[in-house]
Image (cartoon, grey):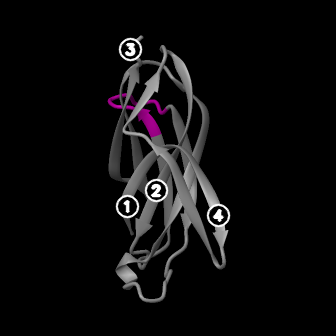
Amino acid sequence: MKVSSVIYAEEVLQENAGTTVRNHIINPLSVILVPFTPATFTFVITINLIDLTDNPKEIHVKFKKKGDEKSVVEMGPINVPVGISIPHIPTEFAGLNFNLNLRNVVLPSEGEYETEIYFDNVLTGSYPINVVKSIS
């Protein structure tokens, strides 16, 4: 199992399309802009996984300020199915995505934050985003 991408956005709308669900990512974020700190902010983290051929995995996700031990938000365990196959896509590229819809998350200060993703309690990747106060 691999993380193929992590996207921060203001919102994700889901559309049922027959046997699948399409995600419409609204306003992808390269930075979280707040008027002051501490602040609360609502956003979505979309995580895409591929190569779900190995043994079942449990995922934990932590959103935290880089360098801090304490998480701002923690999610998990999330159980991931294995053996997903999609017609016309090689097995190692078939996968799934899921959205973490975070509402009114307290961001205590400016700086670099990160989403840490753990598979079976082993850190597999860290994905940064900066929190910045807007210029008046």
Residue displayed at 55% across by 57% down: 24
- Label pair 4/3, CB-CB below 8 angstroms: no
Mark closer to the observer (4, 2)? 4
Above or below, comparing residue 47 to residue 108 in the picture: below
Cβ atoms at labels 1 and 3 below 8 Å apart: no
Residue tagged 1: 3
- The question of residue 74 being in magenta is answered with no
Mark 2, residue position: 47
Secondary structure beneath dot 1 equals strand
3D distance between C-alphas at marks 4 and 2:
17 Å
Dot 1 or dot 3: first in sequence order is 1
**Disc 1 residue type (three-letter):** Val
Q: How many marks?
A: 4
List the residue tagged with mark 3.
135
Q: Which amino acid does label 3 sit on?
A: Ile
Q: Distance between the residues labelled 2 and 3?
A: 30 Å
Asked whether disc 1 touches disc 2, contact meaning CB atoms under 8 Å apart, the reply is yes
Looking at the rendered image, the disc whose residue lies closer to the viewer, 1 or 3, is 3
Query: Tag 4, which secondary structure?
Result: strand
The answer to whether residue 124 is left or right of residue 42 is: left
Q: Where is residue 39 in the image (x, y as percent from the top left)?
A: 53, 19
Q: Which of marks 4 and 1 is in front?
A: 4
- Please name the residue shown 42% across and 50% down the image: 7
SS category of the residue bearing label 3: loop
Name the spot of residue 131 as percent of width and height, x first.
40, 27
> Which residue is tagged 4?
15
The range drawn in magenta is 63-71
Q: Earlier in the sequence, mark 4 or mark 1?
A: 1
